[in-house]
């Protein structure tokens, strides 16, 4: 997957994320910088319990 990020400066600044994979299509996501500034981030993203492995190992 290729990801391109572009910053556009204007009265309403935003980030543009462009995603393309093995498909012939491209998806673009527009995120307002004002929205990012208002976003409440958690104090920690550390897990209290480890997640199980995706694949079970043969024993």
Image (spheres, rainbow, N blue to C red):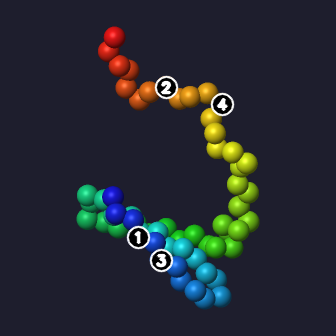
Label 1 and label 2: CA atoms lie apart by: 32 Å
- Return the residue at label 1: 4
- Return the residue at label 4: 48
Considering every residue shown, the one lying at the far top of the view is: 59
Considering every residue shown, the one lying at the far bottom of the view is: 10
The location of residue 20, given as percent across then percent down, is: 33, 63
Label 1 and label 4: CA atoms lie apart by: 34 Å
Label 4 and label 2: CA atoms lie apart by: 13 Å
The kind of secondary structure element at disc 4 is loop
Q: Are marks 3 and 4 in contact (CB under 8 Å)?
A: no
Residue at x 61%, y 81% (from the top left corner): 13
Q: Quadrant of the C terminus?
A: top left
The kind of secondary structure element at disc 1 is strand
Label 1 and label 3: CA atoms lie apart by: 7 Å
Which of the numbered marks, if any, corresponds to residue 6? 3
Residue density around tag 4, few if under 14, some if 14–19, many if 20 or more, within 10 Å? few
Residue 54, compared with residue 17, is above or below; it is above
Which of the numbered marks, if any, corresponds to residue 52? 2
The kind of secondary structure element at disc 2 is loop
The location of residue 5, given as percent across then percent down, is: 46, 72
Q: Give 52 or 11, whichever is nearer the viewer.
A: 52
Q: Which circle's residue, 2 or 3, is located before the other in the chain?
A: 3
Residue at x 49%, y 25% (from the top left corner): 52
Name the front one of labels 3 and 4. 4
Q: Are marks 1 and 3 in contact (CB under 8 Å)?
A: yes
Q: Quadrant of the N terminus?
A: bottom left
Residue density around tag 3, few if under 14, some if 14–19, many if 20 or more, within 10 Å? few
């Amino acid at each position: 997957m290729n990801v391109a990020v572009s910053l556009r400066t204007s009265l309403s600044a935003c980030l543009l994320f462009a995603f393309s994979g093995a498909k012939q299509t491209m998806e673009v996501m527009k995120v307002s910088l004002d929205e990012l500034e208002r976003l409440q981030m958690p104090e920690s993203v550390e897990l209290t319990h480890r997640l199980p492995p995706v694949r079970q190992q043969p024993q």
